[in-house]
Image (tube, rainbow, N blue to C red):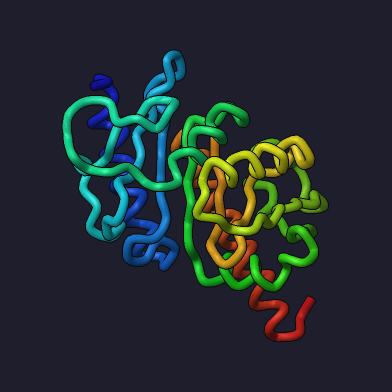
Amino acid sequence: MSENFPQVAASLAATAADFYIRGWMLGTSGNLSAMVQREPLHLIITPSGVDKGELKADQFILIDDRACVIGDGSAKPSDECPLHIRIVKERGAGAVFHTHSVWSTMLSEQNFENGGLAIEGYEMLKGLQGVKTHEHREWLPILENSQNMTELADRVSNSFRQYPGTHGFLLRRHGLYTWGEDLAQAKRHIEILEFLLETVGRSLRSGFN
């Protein structure tokens, strides 16, 4: 077990509680992961089927790059481990967060036929890594959801090749995935993108655009 495990797990548990309060990870929805070492790859990830509002640090699970549990214990890691592993490897991420907000779920359905959602002109876009102006156009690809995580991970990889500059993606009727170089950056990206998704959603519903 990595010596960094307790500290990182405590940070993830606090983040899960915060996201639960904000309505982004209600019940057992959503998952969080963070890298504790890259070579060989070891990730801390949320267990499957656990209420994120009551998640404790000692419930997190350490996995390798094949999603195999490292160490003892009978807990099952999130079913979406393959997506987290793929994002860490292909985006160089140090943390991967997945939320299930109302707005991300609704907009992923409403914009699915367009292949994604474009967000531009908002000052909050500057909270995304590398973005320097509100004139930035952020494209969030929307992928069809699937219970076959290996197949879905392959489609995520294809999306990365097609849209290398994106900071996240949506799964249809499912929610938002984003990542960061570390926990702080991933949390900031969630906050920025969830704000923007809610703003876009509310603007569309009110007829303001």
- Residue, far top: 39
Q: Position of residue 53 (x, y in %)?
A: 28, 60
Nearest the viewer among 81 and 164 is: 81
Question: Residue placed at 54% from the left, 41% from the top?
Answer: 150
- Asked if residue 163 is positioned above or below residue 16 in the image, the reply reads above
Q: Does the image show residue 119?
A: no
Q: Position of residue 132 (x, y in %)?
A: 75, 41
Question: Residue placed at 23% from the left, 22% from the top?
Answer: 1
Q: Position of residue 113 (x, y in %)?
A: 77, 67
- 11 vs 151, left or right, is left
Nearest the viewer among 7 and 56 is: 56
Q: Position of residue 104 (x, y in %)?
A: 58, 65
- The image quadrant of residue 29 is bottom left
- Asked if residue 146 is positioned above or below residue 96 in the image, the reply reads below
- Asked if residue 153 is positioned above or below residue 92 in the image, the reply reads below
Question: Residue placed at 22% from the left, 43% from the top?
Answer: 75
- The image quadrant of residue 74 is top left
Q: Does the image show residue 132?
A: yes
